[in-house]
Image (tube, rainbow, N blue to C red):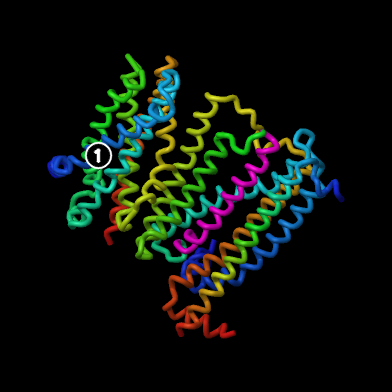
Amino acid sequence: MNIYLKIFMREIKVSMKRWSDILTGVIMFVLVALIFPLTVGTDQMFLIKIIGPVMLLSALLASLISMQNIFKPDFLNGSLEQLTLSHHSLNGLVLMKILSYWATSSLPLVAVSIFIASTYYVTGTSLAAVVITVLLASTTLVNITALAAALTLSVRYPGALMTLILFPLSLPILIFGSKAIEYSIVGIDSSGPFYFLTGMMLLSFSLGPIATAFAIRISLD
Amino acid sequence: MNFKRIYKYGSPPNYFRLCLKYENWFTVPGFLLIVIGCYGGLFIAPPDYQMGDAFRIIYFHVPSAYLSMSAYAYMALAALVGIVWRSNVAFSVAKSIAPFGASFTFLALVTGMLWGKPMWGTAWVWDARLTSEFILLLLYLGYMLLHASIREQKKADRAASVLAIVGVINLPIIHYSVVWWNTLHQASTISKLSSPSIAGEMLWPLLVMIFGYGFFFWGVICRSGATELLKREKRSNWVKEYVEEHQS
Amino acid sequence: MMEFLSMGEYSFFVWSSFLISIFVLLINYLCAHREFISELNKVKLNK
């Protein structure tokens, strides 16, 4: 129990040192969300329609920036190998890494999404729905991102390969997340998509670390 | 059931010889069935009441779509066998299925678009099936690219196999999420492609084509899997013996 | 015969999907064979 807390705190401290990467991710999020009103038009009806996909797409693209920071630095300096060789369960340690990555990369996005959503003319309970959707979707996206990062650990310049792995796996989240936001804006009962997002979050947190730990073991030996 | 007879084909030399011996048993019937199916589909089957002669594209579209999906399942199964039993044979089968599965998916998409243009007026519709097929192509490409990007053979095998397995779990999720996404947006006016209420004369060429494509696929995989195995085991003794036997 | 070749008025679509399917199948078969033969030759050359 203690070791997992230590790993979590260590990852948080290390990520705080790399605050520029977190900031870059947030800026990427804001920039992508900014492009749509600037290029397509500022019609309120249109913007409210696309706020769902824009939020999730921006979150996805922002995660591409900081994806390699989950495992690559530790892989390069050898601490990942030490974690694997220790008698602690790698699944649990990877789960802590993923949680800390979520805390440092996705929570700032959630905070910024409130601002972005209000520039898209979203108000009231819909704003709360947007925040909750980004929160829930980001948990699953973080697990998928970690899996893609672990798979491409032995590739020197993964680049678009990460996108190719990430995109099909995250498609259900994008679809249902957009649905959740859209329904809450229109006023229909949006509990269905939210249940799905929560279900996917639980599925990804239970199976994701196992697959990621397996991929790490593959890349290490 | 005598498992020993199956287990021995897990070893590379036995599998290699098995593949080369039986390859023509798959390819030749496959080719014949495809020819018969083409003849039946293009000549014998009567034109459809609603779609006219354009429905004949079904004889090329349905087998490739069906095969693309089953090829992915076989690839994931081979990947699983390779990871669990650390089998070079299984990994080479999985790696060789990928490009052929991708080409069948490409065929399904292209013939689907060629069918869609005269039928629905538009080459593409964001239907659940079409979108899932497109995502399937991306999954195949992701597998092939991941395999090609990692230098060491064993690492590449296992990493790409993890991707294949996660993809096969995700494929139904993608399909059903697109169904859910689609049905609440637009009423689907597209009739189901594989309706059981299809006339007899139109049905048998379709079945023949599906079997023909399937046999052809297995024949090509035999040859390609053998090639891949040869690539991996260049330095082993059984390859030397095989080359000496076939000095021609 | 012309009626057969024109396939209703859908000749372009039907025949192009026929040709592209046969083309891709043939390419697959030929590529598999060529790869095998070139691999075998590589092995023979190294002996």
Dot 1 corresponds to which residue?
A24
- In the rendered image, residue A218, in percent from the top left (x then y), is placed at 31, 57
Magenta-highlighted stretch: main secondary structure? helix
Closest to the observer: A202 or A56?
A56
Whether residue A84 can be seen here:
no
Quarter location, residue B188: top right
- In the rendered image, residue B236, in percent from the top left (x then y), is placed at 42, 78
Residue at 34 percent across and 48 percent down: it is A148
**Three-letter residue code for mark 1:** Thr
Q: How many marks?
A: 1
The correct choice, above or below, for C29 with respect to A112 in the image is below
- Give, as a single range, the part of the protein colored magenta: B91-120
Location of the N terminus of chain B (image quadrant): bottom right
**Is C42 left or right of B202, judged from the image as shown?**
left
The correct choice, above or below, for A11 with respect to B1 in the image is above
Location of the C terminus of chain B (image quadrant): bottom right
Closest to the observer: B48 or B245?
B48
Residue at 30 percent across and 54 percent down: it is A153
Closest to the observer: B93 or C22?
C22
> Does A182 lie within the magenta span?
no
Identify the secondary structure beneath mark 1: helix
Farthest right residue in view: C1
Quarter location, residue A106: top left
| Subunit that carries the residue with mark 1 | A
- In the rendered image, residue A51, in percent from the top left (x then y), is placed at 39, 25
Whether residue A123 can be seen here:
yes
Are there few (<14), some (14-19), or many (20+) residues within 10 Å of tag 1?
some
> Does B98 lie within the magenta span?
yes
**Is A109 left or right of B194, judged from the image as shown?**
left
**Is A135 left or right of B210, judged from the image as shown?**
left
